[in-house]
Image (tube, coloured by chain):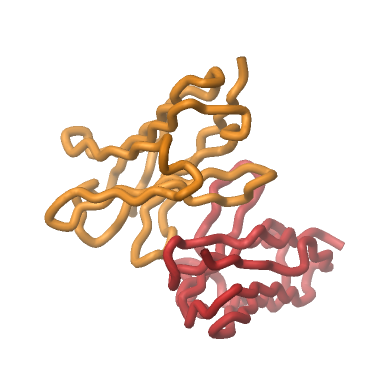
Amino acid sequence: ETVMTQSPATLSVSPGERATLSCRASQSVSSNLAWYQQKPGQAPRLLISGTSTRATGIPARFSGSGSGTEFTLTISSLQSEDFAVYYCQQYNNWPWTFGQGTKVEIK
Amino acid sequence: QVQLQQSGPGLVKPSQTLSLTCAISGNTVSSNSVTWNWVRQSPTRGLEWLGRTYYRSKWSNDYAESVKSRITINPDTSKNQFSLQLKSVTPEDTAVYYCVEVISGIFVYWGQGTVVAVSS
């Protein structure tokens, strides 16, 4: 199966700063890559699909890029509500698989 | 807007069967454009897809290799819901379990999650 590796495991960022999260696939997933946000006690929430398409209601400060095996989620100016865990997920190769997550914490 | 409401016990004894149900509103379990999935999350295994059921002129299922011998996912069209049964559970099956509507591989709508502990 396709292994998704996220880095770093934890990212310490000050409010208002930019956060850059990485996701690497063990084989090409084309552009079939999604990102999810999870806050404590909540289910994951879809942020981005198709590498760069924001889901309904997701602010423009969230952007995604990449293709093949290397992907990036960028949060341009972190707000207090953005401190959470972020997961990538590929849906190009069966079975669908998730990364282990990057925790974005307040610096 | 699709909403998924999970129900089921939060404590299961070792060797017994874990059973959860996911009630669907805003869509039908017989939809031929989505799949109905179960995912679990634990500190050791992260987010782990377990299996799915879906209708494409007939009902089909797919299961993760890690649980294939123990899992059953069934639709219930009369109640517009689907269920998860996981047999012969061990403490390694302790996790938060989610039901999810998946559209073209994207995990769009999630249930609220059920914390399931396997303990005697």
Q: Is residue A98 above or below residue A66?
A: above
Identity of the residue drawn at 44% across and 24% down = B17
Please name whichever residue, B48 or B28, is drawn nearer the observer in this view of the structure. Answer: B48
Question: Total label count?
Answer: 0
Q: Is residue B23 above or below residue A67?
A: above
Q: Quadrant of residue A61?
A: bottom right
Q: Which chain is orange?
A: B
Report the side of A51 relative to B108 (left or right).
Answer: right
Percent across and percent down for residue A77 are 72, 75
Identity of the residue drawn at 73% across and 59% down = A103
Report the side of B66 relative to A99 (left or right).
Answer: left
Residue A91 at least partly seen = yes
Identity of the residue drawn at 40% across and 37% down = B71
Please name whichever residue, B50 or B115, is drawn nearer the observer in this view of the structure. Answer: B50
Report the side of A94 relative to A43 (left or right).
Answer: left
Location of the C terminus of chain A by quadrant is bottom right
Chain A drawn colour: red
Residue B111 at least partly seen = no
Percent across and percent down for residue B35 are 31, 55
Percent across and percent down for residue A98 are 56, 60
Residue furthest to the top: B120
